């Protein structure tokens, strides 16, 4: 066996200035070898990212500091290196790709210049030589029209293209170690597959050691050679992919693996209640005015039709840019449709506006993807939950009593109403958002990627919560997701969108096991983890239907 590129030995990290505080990372040891793909998995707060930041020497000064241990990158101890030496090592010997490329890139500088900055710091190439090297790197990550991309700003690129830019920046100098921290979490399945394939391709081409951090066991099942499982700052299990997925030894690992939703849909009886939502021929076209040029039109939704019955969960699936969120926002009138009919409880609200729309809003509510951004950080969560009730005339004391009942419904104690959003975990914040959405007893709930950013265990809890609320209240749910595994577990019917059009719709079992359209089959083909039955710790046997 070759020598490890990265060797972490007995690493502990603690809060600065608080020697009695519990360490956030404690006695962590593992290594990554040349050409190896090592996946580090665990829930939020398990210490994955803190370990990665320790390797890069990027722990927040004054916040966290290493208490013990060593981190060797090609035999050199990062923890004892001076700041100047650390700067020399970054990009040349070790590099990192962060989760959100938009926050990793400078919004006011062309992306080509940002990659060029890495070369300018570490190389003696001429300006022309650096430009050609950047263009060659952009071409190697399969970006189109690389000369146009070079001069583009981050906001002008798609999420997948921005992630390729960040990968280019990390690999431009051929580091021996690449740390990828949740680089595909917010991406749709096809873009995710492209990024994973790109990382594997570049890894093999340069024989790079890759430390891939993720909470998605579907991704792990696709790319990992070895797996490190972390929990509350400690390593609880290390092993080969097949051993961890099929024969996990620790109870925590078994819980994580079994929480991963399967792509095999559950058998369900189709709801027969009255129609709550009836959308017919919905269209949305954006007109973009441009200086000294003709206006540009973008068709975001075209002739979309769907129905949703009481007690039914309908999944709206497709890639980023397929029109899912546009359709959802038109339905709940956050944006105005260009044309079409949107009937809620038999009343067409597509053209209702102003003061006439306000009393109708209590019949439909939405839960957004990011619960932290959905809640006012300066308001107690109890005040956020009762806001709608108070606005519609309910006395404050009565509204607070109602909020307490809703918190019990979503599995939280009424006492938490006095806390602020930052005092909760991501899963708890999402439960609070669900409680707020249910406060007005709506007939329709729209969940827009409501579980996509959550850990698999928390995701399973929120999905179970939605199922229970549906059973208790009979609410109709329009569930928007790019994760077909989640749709398979919770949806009665699935509507597949492509470029703003409905290409396939029907019962979830039929759409996922016997898809009629090539686009649907392509989505299933690239769904991560499709070859594993995680609940039963075994590979899935192919049945010729697109699964397995």
Image (tube, rainbow, N blue to C red):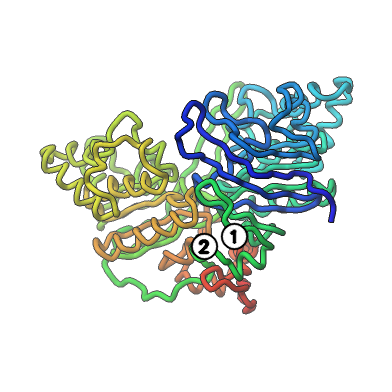
Callout 1: few (<14), some (14-19), or many (20+) C-alpha neighbours within 10 Å? many
Q: Quadrant of the N terminus?
A: bottom right
Q: Residue at x 57, y 56 (%)?
A: 236
Compared across the picture, whether 278 is left or right of 149 comes to left
In the rendered image, residue 142, in percent from the top left (x then y), is placed at 77, 45
Q: Residue at x 27, y 37 (%)?
A: 384
User: Which residue carries the number 2 mark?
Assistant: 260
Query: Image height check: is 541 above or below 171?
Result: below
- Looking at the image, how many numbered discs can be counted on the residues? 2
Rendered image: mark on residue 259? none
Query: Is any atom of residue 218 visible in this view?
Result: yes
In the rendered image, residue 495, in percent from the top left (x then y), is placed at 47, 62
User: Which residue carries the number 1 mark?
Assistant: 218
Query: Residues under labels 1 and 2: Cα distance?
Result: 8 Å
Compared across the picture, whether 531 is left or right of 506 comes to right
Query: Image height check: is 253 above or below 545?
Result: above
In the rendered image, residue 344, in percent from the top left (x then y), is placed at 28, 54
Q: Nearer the viewer, residue 114 or 429?
A: 429
Q: Nearer the viewer, residue 370 or 156?
A: 370
* Contact flag, marks 1 and 2 (Cβ < 8 Å): yes
Q: Quadrant of the C terminus?
A: bottom right
Query: Is any atom of residue 344 visible in this view?
Result: no
Query: Image height check: is 324 above or below 420?
Result: below
Q: Secondary structure at mark 1?
A: helix
User: Residue 298's quadrant in the figure?
Assistant: top right
In the rendered image, residue 524, in percent from the top left (x then y), is placed at 60, 64
């Amino acid at each position: 066996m070759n020598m490890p590129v990265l060797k972490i030995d007995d690493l502990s990290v603690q809060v600065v200035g608080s020697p009695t505080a519990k360490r956030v990372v404690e006695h962590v040891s593992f290594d990554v070898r040349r050409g190896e793909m090592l996946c580090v998995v665990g829930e939020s707060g398990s210490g994955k990212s803190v370990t990665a930041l320790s390797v890069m020497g990027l722990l927040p000064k004054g916040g966290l500091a290493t208490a013990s241990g060593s981190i060797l990158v090609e035999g050199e101890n990062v923890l004892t290196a001076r700041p100047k030496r650390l700067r020399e090592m970054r990009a040349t010997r070790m590099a990192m790709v962060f989760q959100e490329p938009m926050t990793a890139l400078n919004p006011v500088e062309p992306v080509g210049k940002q990659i060029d900055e890495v070369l300018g710091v570490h190389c003696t190439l001429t300006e022309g030589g650096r430009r050609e090297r950047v263009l060659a790197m952009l071409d190697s990550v399969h970006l189109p029209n690389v000369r146009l991309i070079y001069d583009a700003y981050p906001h002008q690129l798609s999420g997948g293209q921005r992630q390729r830019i960040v990968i280019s920046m990390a690999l431009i100098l051929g580091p021996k170690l690449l740390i990828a921290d949740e680089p595909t979490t917010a991406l749709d399945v096809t873009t995710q597959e492209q990024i994973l394939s790109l990382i594997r391709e570049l890894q093999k081409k340069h024989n790079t050691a890759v430390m891939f951090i993720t909470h998605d066991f579907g991704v792990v099942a696709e790319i990992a050679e070895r797996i490190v499982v972390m929990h509350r700052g400690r390593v609880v299990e290390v092993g080969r992919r097949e051993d961890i997925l099929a024969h996990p030894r620790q109870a925590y690992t078994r819980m994580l693996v079994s929480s991963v939703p399967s792509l095999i849909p559950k058998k369900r009886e189709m709801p027969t209640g009255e129609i709550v939502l009836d959308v017919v021929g919905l269209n949305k076209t954006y007109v973009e005015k441009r200086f000294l040029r003709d206006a540009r039109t973008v068709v975001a939704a075209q002739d979309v039709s769907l129905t949703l019955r009481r007690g039914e969960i309908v999944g709206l699936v497709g890639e980023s840019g397929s029109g899912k969120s546009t359709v959802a926002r038109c339905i709940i009138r956050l944006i105005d449709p260009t044309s079409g009919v949107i009937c809620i409880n038999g009343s067409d609200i597509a053209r209702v506006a102003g003061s006439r729309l306000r009393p109708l809003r209590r019949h439909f509510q939405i839960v957004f993807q990011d619960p932290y951004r959905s809640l006012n950080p300066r308001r107690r969560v109890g005040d956020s939950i009762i806001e709608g009730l108070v606005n519609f005339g309910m006395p404050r004391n009565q509204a607070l009593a109602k909020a307490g009942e809703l918190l019990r419904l979503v599995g939280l104690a009424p006492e938490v109403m006095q806390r602020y959003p930052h005092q909760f975990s991501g899963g708890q914040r999402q439960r609070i958002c669900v409680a707020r959405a249910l406060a007005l007893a709506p007939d329709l709930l729209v969940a827009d990627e409501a579980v996509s950013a959550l850990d698999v265990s928390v995701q399973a809890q929120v999905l179970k919560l939605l199922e229970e609320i549906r059973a208790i209240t009979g609410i109709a749910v329009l569930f928007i997701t790019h994760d077909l595994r989640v749709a398979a577990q919770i949806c009665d019917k699935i509507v597949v969108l492509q470029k703003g059009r409905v290409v396939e719709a029907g019962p979830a079992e039929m759409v996922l096991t016997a898809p009629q359209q090539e686009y649907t089959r392509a989505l299933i083909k690239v769904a991560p983890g499709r070859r594993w039955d995680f609940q039963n710790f075994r590979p899935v046997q192919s049945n010729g239907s697109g699964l397995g």
